Image: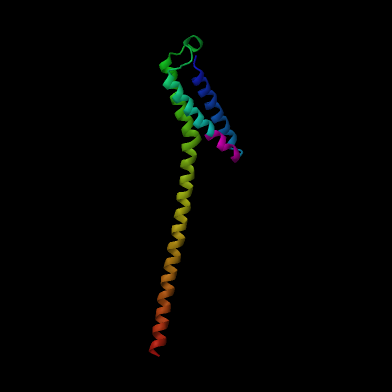
Amino acid sequence: MGVYLVLYFISLGCALLFYYISKKKEKMYGFSVFFMVLMIFFLVFALATDDPIDELVTTIPAFWQFVLTGLGGAFTIWKVYLNPLKTKVYGMDREIGEVKTSVGRMESEMKSAFQRLEKEIDNLIKK
């Protein structure tokens, strides 16, 4: 009958729909991740029960149904989760680079200030 595969496609569509909505509203991103996880759950059940959509309805053999659903799921996982994660990591890497630069600059300023202070203390001791 293909119940799990149909639920998989519904979850896939909802995940992509909420992902594109979340581009305008940040609050909706959690729904797209939820439907992505639900989609994976239904795909595992469909594969475990060998439950493709009847070939009378789609005329697509069961093997190709599972291959196409796997590819669709991989695209959805990449689009919904992995690509935004990559963007966040790049942003964090840039921020960490800025922080390292600032800390390095402060460290060099502190070293020069301590060297000047040591010279002043040495001059005071010598007098």
Q: Is residue 32 above or below residue 58?
A: below
Q: Say which residue appears at 48% left-offset and 42% top-offset.
A: 87
Q: Position of residue 127 (x, y in %)?
A: 40, 90
Q: Quadrant of residue 117?
A: bottom left
Q: Residue at x 47, y 56 (%)?
A: 98
**Residue 19 located left or right of residue 112:** right
Above or below, comparing residue 54 to residue 75 in the picture:
above
For the rendered model, the colour scheme is rainbow
Q: Is residue 46 above or below residue 114?
A: above
Q: Which is more toward the observer, 4 or 98?
A: 4
Residue drawn at point x = 55 percent, y = 33 percent: 32
Magenta portion: prevailing SS class: helix
Q: Quadrant of residue 16?
A: top right
| Residue 27 forms part of the magenta stretch | yes
93, above or below 55, in the image: below
Residue found at the very far bottom of the displayed protein: 127
* Residue with the most extreme top position: 56
Estimate the x, y position of residue 84 in percent, counting from the top left: 50, 39
The residue stretch that appears in magenta: 26-33
**In magenta segment, residue 89:** no
Q: With 26 as the anchor, is 79 left or right in this view?
A: left
* Residue 48 in the image, given as x and y percentages of width and height: 42, 22
Give the total of numbered labels: 0
**Residue 22 drawn at (x, y percent):** 58, 37
